[in-house]
Image (cartoon, rainbow, N blue to C red):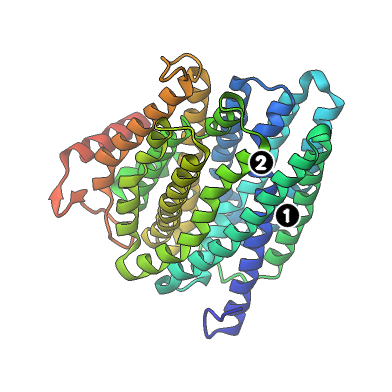
Amino acid sequence: MRSFTTNPTVNKSLRLSVFDGAAFNAMMGLTQDFMSPFALALKASTAQVGLLASLPNLALALSQLGSPWISERLRSRKSLLVPMVIIQAVLWLPIFIMPQLFHNMAVWWLIALFTAGSVFGALGNPAWGSMMADLVPAGMRGRYFGFRNRIGGATLLSCFFIGGLILQLSSKQVMLGFGTLFGSAVIFRLASAYFLSKMYEPPMRRCPDPWHPMQELKTLPATNAGRLSLFVGAMMFATYVASPFFAVYMLTELGFGYGAFVIVTASASVANFLFMGYWGRRADKSGHLKVVRLTALMIPLVPVVWLVSHNLIYLIVIQVFSGFVWSGFNLSSTNLLYESAAPERRTRAIAVYNFLSGTAMCVGAAIGGVIATRLPEISGQSFLTLFLLSGILRGAVTLFMLPGLSRSSRDEDAPIISNGVPSRSVSRIFKVFQRFID
């Protein structure tokens, strides 16, 4: 494997992090896109599928606010991160077993246990992001995380295809197939914990002031990291109004089998890891802010193009477009956050960022689940109306909030500008948020 730095200790840890990412993505490939099909196999309703997507995100979001407090008291980010990963790994077993034992409450057991697993897995995220930002030199974050994400994406895609094949082959005994997926997920997540435990952790720089979540939220509009968090949170809300229901639309309305479902869904993953290196190089050269701006302009198109056709080849093409756009947005928005937050405040900034994104996902998915079957139909499908609504909301977020992002490299009071000119509409949006918090 390539060398990333001249420091052998750091270089070894960055390599271990690549292995950790591959193991994590193996778990995700075997589980992430199969949770809705698993719920449907347990006879879940559309509203329950929406709750399965929303409730874990709400619990995950709330857990983020406790992560800085725990890691700062442990005085070690790994002391929080590794145990949480182990617990998440073990929880995949009851996620599968308990619904088999309690048939009348099967879906509710699934929702409760999947939520618990998501919380334990996410508690260490701010600590992980802070540790990695300390390990990876600033000038190569785009390339390193692009490389790491490409390896992870290839692993995720491979495991996703294998998972789809397992379900296709076990269609007459589908629960056996899901059990195989979740059992394998346990092994891969435990491997992830092992690689994390062997990594070097740079000395943790402590923030001098105590952690007060509400105070952090009040000051969001005044900082670059805060405005980025608000923007990404709003974009996640607009996205998750529709995101959990593409799988439902394909499986129930279009009548796709697991094979077609896997092919369409995997197309986005293929594009994601293929273009990750391109976005990483571009970001290191031109800046992460430019990549965020460019991809944010394209994100509103992603759900809207689903209205044009339900042809399998066409859906594969638009999923490739989706993977291209989201790979750049996700990579650069995360790295822009690392750049915007001072090192001693980075764990807190990541926690707030994840809190807002998770809350937005939860609220968006919950609203989508409630209104999905109540909207006027387009071509006989209310899901298509939901996709159009999501596109309009994404466009509004881009139009009104994107100009508020600044290229400054630290959390400092910076004017909200757009091409050097104060943006009044953006200022009003952030002032409204501040009044709401107060």
* Residue occupying image coordinates x 40% and y 40%: 302
Say what secondary structure mark 1 lies in.
Answer: helix
Name the residue nearer the viewer: 127 or 418: 418
Q: Amino acid at mark 2?
A: Gly
Asked if residue 119 shows in the view, the reply is: no
Query: Quick one: label 1, few (<14), some, or many (20+) residues within 10 Å?
Result: many
Say what secondary structure mark 2 lies in.
Answer: helix
- Give the residue at mark 2: 259
- Give the residue at mark 1: 189
Estimate the x, y position of residue 11 in percent, counting from the top left: 58, 79
Query: Counting residues from the N terminus, which is met first, the one under dot 2 or under dot 1?
Result: 1
Name the residue nearer the viewer: 290 or 155: 155
Estimate the x, y position of residue 314 in percent, counting from the top left: 46, 41
Residue 175 placement: quadrant: top right
Residue lying furthest left in this view? Answer: 421
* Residue occupying image coordinates x 51% and y 16%: 373
Residue 77 placement: quadrant: bottom right
Q: Amino acid at mark 1?
A: Arg
